[in-house]
Amino acid sequence: MARWLPRSTDLTRFCQKLNRVKTLEDDMMETSFNRCLSTIDLTLLGIGGMVGSGLYVLTGTVAKEIAGPAVIVSFIIAGFASLLAALCYAEFGARVPKTGSAYMFTYVSVGEIWAFLIGWNVLLEYMIGGAAVARAWSGYLDSIFNHKIKNFTETHVGTWQVPFLAHYPDFLAAAILLVATAFISFGAKVSSWLNHVFSAISMGVILFILIMGFVLAQPKNWSTQEGGFAPFGLSGIMAGTATCFYAFVGFDVIAASSEEARNPQRAVPRAIAFSLGLATGAYILVSVVLTLMVPWHTLDPDSALADAFYRRGYAWAGFLVAAGSICAMNTVLLSNLFSLPRIVYAMAEDGLFFQVFSRVHPRTQVPVIGIVVFGLLMALLALVFDLEALVQFLSIGTLLAYTFVAASIIVLRFQQQKADVPAPTAGGQPNPEPHEGPSTGELKEYESFSDKIQLVDRDKSKEHREPGQLKAAFEPYLEFLSDFYPGEVVMVAVVTLMVSAICLCSVLVFGNSHLHLPTWSYSLLLVLFSLGFLLSLLLIWVHEQQQNTQTFQIPLVPLSPALSIVLNIYLMLKLSYMTWLRFAIWLLLGLLVYFGYGIWHSKENLREPRAQCISARYVVFPSGSLEERVQPVQPSAQPAPPLPDTDTTDRKR
């Protein structure tokens, strides 16, 4: 039996494959896409992605079924959590101006398998987002014609009574997705122009809703006679917050479009800040006027705003709102169909997904195959699935992506920059001589075959510290941490921080309601896991981080990303168990795709050497001591000459 067990070296090599990071090109501005988008284009793209069915449909759904008028608080909390995540996206989008969004950010900092799983979930996120918006679009158009389309379909086609499926096939939703797919295929310029038109109409309708809504507002609708401001309590507010994340998923379209921005270092952070601020304000104000116009428990979840104006006697206003909401949903459809093929392109370009999706049309400079294939898949989802089930599934994928991007920010900030690592000499041949430096302990490198193989001695008295090293002020107290490689302690602390956050949030969510813990054990677990979280945070903070003033950086690292991680995990645990079950099934399908295709075709896998030899070398440190290190050495491109029989080592003194 023992011979069938994998060796430890094989397991180590396998784990290294799973956690290898993407190698970025020297010129990250080089691309096969057309860099034609300005800051205004990206801002309107982000607004279009966020202000759509979430404003016209989700507001009424959450207010009636989950939170009541306290949906306002749900949107505030969701907006704050999205802000923390948006700042992480802004920093990554400025530093790594490549398409791929959360997938790319995770790949360059955390590891390959985690990046693939994030990308796999982002694919589902965009497909569900487009399908859900298409069904909302269809419902609003149907409401204009007094539900004649729905009645016709139910009469002549029939209805379904299957969980998670729509009661009837929505052919209109599928049709609008196919039309939007055709427009997206024409290129980024056409998509941007259409988005400008629909966004202008949408913002005009929102302004009309706010003015008319405050005129028709009745404060008694928040009174105790109607159930009060928060009829479902704090639990309802937090459950509504998790669902309200659907409203803010659109800002990551800006990061996904960074490879088509003219100046991504400046345009991406500004566009994310402007679009998220405007969208959050719109959601809060519209929630206020909606719950003040009519009692929250009488809202129509399918078309809350239009129905509210109809019931107040302003039929013409309801017609205008319904028509304007259709324009707003068009921007969301364009946003989803614009981003999804680019995520697929990034994964296919890296070899983790099927290579056919990495083809870019030479004239339109867009991935046409990905646009058509996933546009058809979106249309199929919109045809048969129910909106509410899709929205719940969407939230968990979004929150998971936010969590990994926040963790990636911490890891990347405490890693050594690429410029800090000496590159190989021309021709890829090793340099047998050490780098010259002062005799007081400057970095010395012997036979460097790649930028990841270094033998160095750090002068502990040197004031300048590299990212990932222990700060000089804490070295007298934490001297044992200085023996680790730069960034190694931070990586372990990030993992500990996430585990502590999961345990802490699990106790908060399930401690009283499901586990029925006694008060003393509930409090003890909260204290223990909180201490673990804070100690991990402190352990990260005592290390040096990158100080890059050329691009945008999120403030208060590692505190800001850590808060984002905690809030995202808490909101994920508030979702239903059926959502987690469907999510687990989707992850298993993703793992089958990765281990069946991605791990073998990954470009990082092709960069790895096929054979290795062992070479012993001697390294002289400034103290004058002699130390022998034996490690695998990457062979050069040319075949190595046979080694002498008398000596198999290359000795350098």
Image (tube, rainbow, N blue to C red):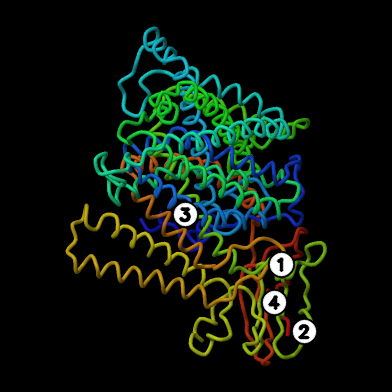
Measured as percent of width and height from the top left, residue 514 is found at 21, 52
Identify the residue at image location x=62%, y=48%.
255
First in sequence: mark 4 or mark 3?
A: 3
Residue under pointer 4: 647
The answer to which quarter of the image holds residue 375 is top right
Q: Quadrant of the C terminus?
A: bottom right
First in sequence: mark 1 or mark 2?
A: 2
Name the mark nearer the viewer: 1 or 3: 3
Residue under pointer 3: 81
Task: Give the crowd class for mark 3: few <14, some 14-19, many >=20 residues within 10 Å.
Answer: many
Task: Give the crowd class for mark 4: few <14, some 14-19, many >=20 residues within 10 Å.
Answer: few
Compare residues 326 and 305 and report the one nearer the observer: 305
State if disc 3 and disc 4 touch (CB < 8 Å): no
At mark 2, the secondary structure is: loop
The answer to which quarter of the image holds residue 622 is bottom right
Residue under pointer 2: 437
Task: Give the crowd class for mark 1: few <14, some 14-19, many >=20 residues within 10 Å.
Answer: some
Circle count: 4
Q: Residue furthest right?
A: 426
Amino acid, disc 3: Ala
Name the mark nearer the viewer: 4 or 3: 3
Q: CA distance from mark 2 to mark 3?
A: 48 Å
Q: CA distance from mark 4 to mark 1?
A: 22 Å
State if disc 3 and disc 1 touch (CB < 8 Å): no
Residue under pointer 1: 449
Measured as percent of width and height from the top left, residue 557 is found at 54, 67
Amino acid, disc 4: Asp
Measured as percent of width and height from the top left, residue 297 is found at 30, 34
Measured as percent of width and height from the top left, residue 408 is found at 54, 59
Compare residues 383 and 519 and report the one nearer the observer: 519
Q: Residue furthest front?
A: 215
At mark 1, the secondary structure is: loop
